[in-house]
Every structure is written in structure tokens, then in C-alpha cells.
Image (cartoon, rainbow, N blue to C red):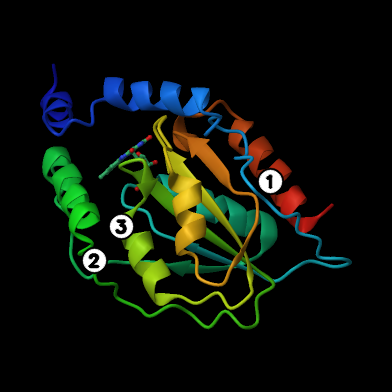
Amino acid sequence: MSNETKDANKAGLSRRNLLKVTAAGLLAGAAIPLLPYLGSTHSYASGTGRAKMLIIYYSLTGNTKYIAEQIRKKTGGDLFVIETVKTYPSEYSALTEEAKRELQTGDLPALKKNPPDMSSYDLVLVGSPVWWYTVSTPVMSFLRQADFAGKKVSAFCTHEGGIGKFFPHFKEQAKNAVVLEGLDLYKPRQARKGEVDKALDLWLSKLRGK
Ligand SMILES: Cc1cc2nc3c(=O)[nH]c(=O)nc-3n(C[C@H](O)[C@H](O)[C@H](O)COP(=O)(O)O)c2cc1C
């Protein structure tokens, strides 16, 4: 067993545990990896022309960043990166413990920047990794500060098979947002060629109401 696997096992976040949760989530109709989440949604009809889009994301190990950049390439939207003041531990077990502590205590990480001015955007996309079956604590921190003031907002997440309550929690925390259909992507950088592209195109076309 590799040190990384041992660490993950110690932290109670082994791949096997994640897969168990995924199976439970699937049974509860919570998620289908790489297919859009079909929770309570509204369709986004932008009418003619392209909606002006803001893509906000947090990414620790690059997966969510990869998706955010794909979306930017496809839509020409603007990017806003959520960054924490502190540096998370690079060692996996310490990292998962730190994230668990933040979640349990509500001691969310301070961010480098305040939320951007969203007034000129028609649609705001918010990307996060799944941490402990929910929204990552840096994105929770962002949501604590942001007020979407009636904006159309959609979340996307990357994960390793257990999205748990990510979308319902996002919806609860996105203040004053009209939350549209989200998208979850399972290990996007390891997906078959074209698969991520297809999922993104389908999701974006639904959001645009085409
Ligand atoms: C602290 C922590 C907790 C995680 N918890 C989960 C989880 O509950 N379910 C899951 O499927 N993946 C979980 N993962 C894996 C990440 O969601 C996945 O690797 C994601 O794509 C990372 O995104 P990033 O590269 O943008 O940081 C966790 C990773 C970390 C670091």
C-alpha cells in the first residue's frame, strides 16, 4: 500500500469509502458521474445573442481549474479565481483533516479577494471540488461573502465518485441566487477523449436555453 493510500485510509477518506458513498448517492438519485445533476432546476433562456458569463472557481489540485478554463474557451466568459490566504497542507491526510476541521467548526478559510462585482453578468458559474461530500470550504467561504442578488447561478464540481450533498448545499448557501442546473464531473482529466467536452456542451446549451 502506498503512503498516500495509507494516509487516505487513516483519514477515513479511502477510495473504497468514497465509492460506498457514491453507490449510496446513486441509489438516492443524487448523482450520475459526468451527467448533469438533475436536481430542482430552472432553464436558462438568454433569448438572442450570448449571455455575458462570469466563471468563478476554486481548485487545489487543478481539476476544477481545467474545467473552468474549458468553459472559458467555449464561452469567452470572464474568470475569477478564489484563493485562500493560508496554504493547505500538501500531505493528503493532513489536508483532509484540516478540511474536516473547517467544516465541523465553521472556521472557514480567509480569502485573498472579496467577491467581484457581478452586476454586469447575466449568468454566473461557480466551480468547486467536492470536499467531504459537500462544497469545498474555500467556496463556502466565498458564498458566505457573496450576494448574488437575483442572478442566475449554476454550480459545477469535480470529484472522485462521491458528490453527496454538494448541489443542495450549494443552493442553500448561494444567497439570493436563482440556481440553475449544475454539472458534476468525475475525474475530468482522466475521462475518455471528448467525454468532458460533450458533457460541457450539453450543460452549457441547456443553460443558454438553446
Ligand atoms: C479535502 C478533500 C476532500 C475530498 N472529499 C471528496 C469527497 O467527499 N468525494 C469525492 O468524490 N472526492 C473527494 N475529494 C477528491 C476531490 O473532489 C477531487 O480530486 C477534485 O477533482 C479535486 O479538485 P481540484 O483538483 O480542482 O482541487 C476530496 C479531496 C480533498 C482534498
Residue 14, above or below 94: above
Q: Amino acid at mark 2?
A: Pro
Q: Earlier in the sequence, mark 2 or mark 3?
A: 2
Q: Are marks 2 and 3 in contact (CB under 8 Å)?
A: yes
The quadrant in which the N terminus is found is top left
The quarter holding residue 7 reads top left
Would you name the residue on which mark 2 appears? 109
Residue 112, above or below 127: below
Q: Residue at x 27, y 67 (%)?
A: 84
Q: Amino acid at mark 3?
A: Thr
CA gap, disc 2 and disc 1: 30 Å
CA gap, disc 2 and disc 3: 7 Å
The single residue placed furthest to the right in the displayed view is: 48
Q: Amino acid at mark 1?
A: Trp
x, y (%) of residue 202? 72, 42
Q: Residue at x 61, y 43 (%)?
A: 39
Per the image, label 1 sits on a secondary structure element best described as helix
Q: Residue at x 20, y 48 (%)?
A: 100
Would you name the residue on which mark 3 appears? 137
Would you name the residue on which mark 1 appears? 203
x, y (%) of residue 52? 70, 71
CA gap, disc 1 and disc 3: 25 Å
Per the image, label 3 sits on a secondary structure element best described as helix
Q: Taking the image as drawn, is residue 204 in sight?
A: yes
